[in-house]
Structure formats: structure tokens, C-alpha cells
Amino acid sequence: MEWETVIGLEIHTQLATNSKIFSGASTAYGAEANTQACAVDLGLPGVLPVLNREVVNMAIKFGLAIDAELTPVSVFARKNYFYPDLPKGYQISQYELPIVGLGKLEIELENGETKIIGVTRAHLEEDAGKSVHEGFTNMTGIDLNRAGTPLLEIVSEPDLRSAKEAVAYMKKMHSLVRYLEISDGNMQEGSFRCDANVSVRPKGQKEFGTRAELKNINSFRFVERAINFEVERQIDVIEGGGKVVQETRLYDANKDETRSMRSKEEAMDYRYFPDPDLLPVVITEKQIDDIRKTLPELPGAKRDRFMNDFKLSREDASLITSSREMADYFEVVNAKCQDAKLAANWVTGTLTGALNKDGKDLSDSPVSADMLAGMLLRLKDNTISGKIAKEIFEAMWQGEGDADTIIDKKGLKQITDTGAIESVLDEIIAANPKQVEELKSGKDKLMGFFVGQVMKQTGGKANPGQVNQLLRKKLDL
Ligand code: ADP
Ligand code: MG
């Protein structure tokens, strides 16, 4: 039987405010445990939460970016449950009336096509504290610093049909919140994580199968692996004559498997009710219009502009605009060297490779956009060859200065003096009579051999095109 996978994601993204959603306590990451939760975050008797205006603005910004219906009057609700990291016994969230309603996000599939994924809703809520196991034996520590940190929970429609599509959606959403500057998207620190709802159904069947919810996945790689494992598991269960039960499962990255946490029967009844301490959130047309004016150029629009204005391929344009930093970097390089294809190749190739290798972000790149452009100009005006360019890039990466300094210091200027190249060629021709004969008798592949020899002798400083020409002239080819 052929099976179809159905997936819906719930993404939690931490909003980049300085203070918490209902208190003035700091949201900075990495402080000493339990130094950043105040009485409001802990829900001590007699305190009153006050909504942080900035989180509302950020939610509106997000809603506009995904073409969503914004809810004029949304409501905070208490979600009641007991857990050690939630001392007040309830989480303030939104339930029936979330601030952001139905919207959509376009993703790109591997075959180059695009697909629209529905976003059911996005609501504001506070984060809970954290259990800490490291450094404790027979005990669990509780760190409440994170309690009250603002989150935007983004719930997708069950529109995703494979683990790959889920990853593409998650990446696109990650890129979007960073473009909007509403979240730093730091996945190691838990600022961007998701729950994946997964089910399977026989291909062609209209009704959805029973889903399992995979909790708290904090990397793109794990989302893909967790979903693939879960799909296989569900198919095995059904093909073995069993039934998938609705449950919450945990993905264990070490074992690469999902395990049951609780079934639907054990699912909690949260007894949601409107929080009596907080007024409904009213947003006005004026507020929406003001925020609309602050929207940056979004990834899709930027990609299309790069394709139209710079004639980049869709693949290059998508890759470069996947992050705002890379797009900005590219634009600086391109403006200075006036060669979009060359700039795109270096940004997506050598530069990205070097960043990945050293585990660096573009913002910490030792080679600035200006420096890269400076080097590409020397490549374009034939001062250096492509091979030497790689060498110079490496030297710039190691902090040896800009391209012109390195070219001077190391004497890397390309040899354009025909006389100099000819004398090297003469030597090589004399030393390789057999190859010369073969080349003359039509074995044109040997051109590569001769050019290679010249490059070797000149330490990569000859211009390959020029060598080619001179050789043909010398041998009457
Ligand atoms: P809950 O409130 O229990 O989390 P929701 O109806 O809000 O349930 O759905 C949560 C997520 O599960 C959404 O992203 C939705 O798209 C997804 N989802 C719902 N039904 C299915 C299904 N049968 N298979 C896969 N995903 C599903
Ligand atoms: Mg859920």
C-alpha cells in the first residue's frame, strides 16, 4: 500500500524583547539561575501582570508578513496545569481569540516549485522555567529565569506532506522571524523550536489518520529525522494490523527514535479561562498601518528582485536571500564589483564554505563584504587569476589584510607579460616532446596538461587564457 504523510507544525519562537511579556524582568540569556524571575513571573500573591506593548507590535508585524487576519480584540487565557517549572500553576496564553488568525507562507520544494502552507493562527504566551539535571544527583534543579519570556506560537495547517517539506517550512519561518527582527531565532538557546504533529493515511484517502505529536525539537536536522522515524513507525503499526494511538511522543536524538510520553487518555484538561488580571488586547487600524510602514523587504520579494535586477538564478537568489545578513552582504559586494554572478558564486561558495568550516556567523566573518569585493575587482581586471584569488581569500580570512596588501606583500600579481610566459612555455615544450607531438596530432585534451605545467612553474600567476592562446600560436594549432 502507498502511504501519504500529513504534518502540521507548532513553532515556538521567542520574541526579542528586553523585558518579559508581563513584567520588567530581563530576558537576557545565560544569567545565573533564578536571578531573573520577579514576583510577577512567579505569580506570587497580590501581583498584577502588565502586558509588554512591544510583543503586541511584534505579533502584528508577523501577522502582516504572512498576510494574516489580525484579531481586533484578542484575549489572554490561563492554561492550568501543575509542573515544577511553573510555580504559579498556570501559563498565560491565548486560546479562543489569538492575536493572529489565518495566514499563509510560501515554501520552495526541492523540484524548484513552490507551495503555499496555511498558518492557522499565531498566539502570544509566556514561557515556563526549566528543569536542570546537569550538576545534580538524585535531585532536579529548577531555573526560573525563563519564566515569563515572551513567545509567539505559530500553528500551521496540516498542509505539509513530507519531512522535507516540514524542514523547508521551518527554515522559511526561521528566516522570516529574523528578517522581521522579532526573534533572534537562536536554536541552541531554545529561541526557535517546534512540535511536529505527524500522521499517515493511505494515498488517495480523504480523512486524516490519527496523529502523534513529537515534542520540542530544536534543530532542522532533528525535525527531519524525527518525522521520518515516526512515519516509519506508524506505517509498521498499521501494516502489522494495529492502530496508531493519539499521543505525545518525545524524540531522542541520541537513539534517533521517538518514545511515548503520554496518550490522549492521560492528556490534561487545561481548564482554559480568560485571565481576569489582563484586559483584552485591542489593536487599531492606525497601529497596524504604522507597523506596516516598518516592514522590511521580505525574503520572497528580495529573491524576485535579485532574479530580475541581477539576473541571478532562482537557486542562487533563494539561497542568498534565505538570510537578511547574507542578502545585505551580497548587495554590498555586488554594488562594488558590479558582477552579480561572480559575487553570488563567491558568497554562496567559498565564503559560505569558510563560515561553515569555522562554525562562524556571517556577522563574525573575518572577510568583510568590502574586502571580498576588493579582491573580486582584482580578479576582474586580471591582476590575479582564479587560483590565486582562492589563496588571497584564505589569507584575508587569516587576518593578513585586504587583497591589495596581500598581492603586494606576496608578489601575487598575475604575469601578463607575454615574453615571460613565452619563455616558460618554451622550456616546457622542449622538455615534453612526446606530448607536443600528440597535441599537434589532435589530442586537444593535452592543452590542459601544458596550461597546468605553466601554472605550476609560475605558482599560479599566469593567466590560463593567455597561456592557451600563446601555446596555440607557438604550435600553429
Ligand atoms: P492541539 O490543540 O491538540 O494541539 P490542534 O488541532 O490545534 O490540536 O492541532 C495542532 C497541530 O496539529 C496543527 O499544526 C495541525 O495542523 C496539526 N494536525 C491536526 N490534525 C493532524 C493530523 N491528523 N495529522 C497531522 N497533523 C495534524
Ligand atoms: Mg498542541
Image: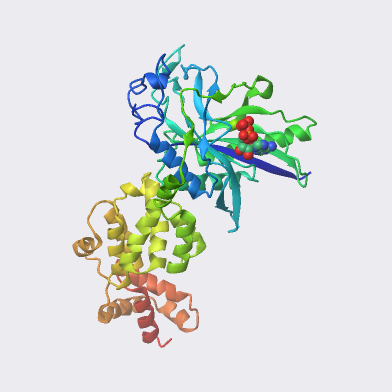
Determine whether, in the image, residue 159 is placed left or right of residue 277. Answer: right
Where 213 sits versus 86, above or below?
Answer: below
Q: Residue 170's spot in the image, x, y percent?
A: 53, 44
Q: Quadrant holding ligand 2?
A: top right
Q: Nearer the viewer, residue 97 or 228?
A: 97
Looking at the image, residue 157 sits to the left or right of residue 449; the answer is: right
Residue lying farthest top?
A: 138
Residue at 25%, 62% in the rendered image = 403
Residue 459 image point, x, y percent? 30, 66
Residue 362 in sight in this render: yes
Colour basis: rainbow
Q: Is residue 144 above or below residue 61?
A: above
Residue 143 visible here = no
User: For the point 37% across and 86% down, which residue is it?
Assistant: 473
**Which quadrant of the view contains residue 409?**
bottom left
> x%, y% of residue 251?
57, 31
Q: Nearer the viewer, residue 184 or 53?
A: 53
Residue 281 location (% of width, % of height): 47, 34
Q: Residue at x 37, y 69 (%)?
A: 339
Task: Report the number of discs.
Answer: 0
Q: Which image quarter: residue 130?
A: top left
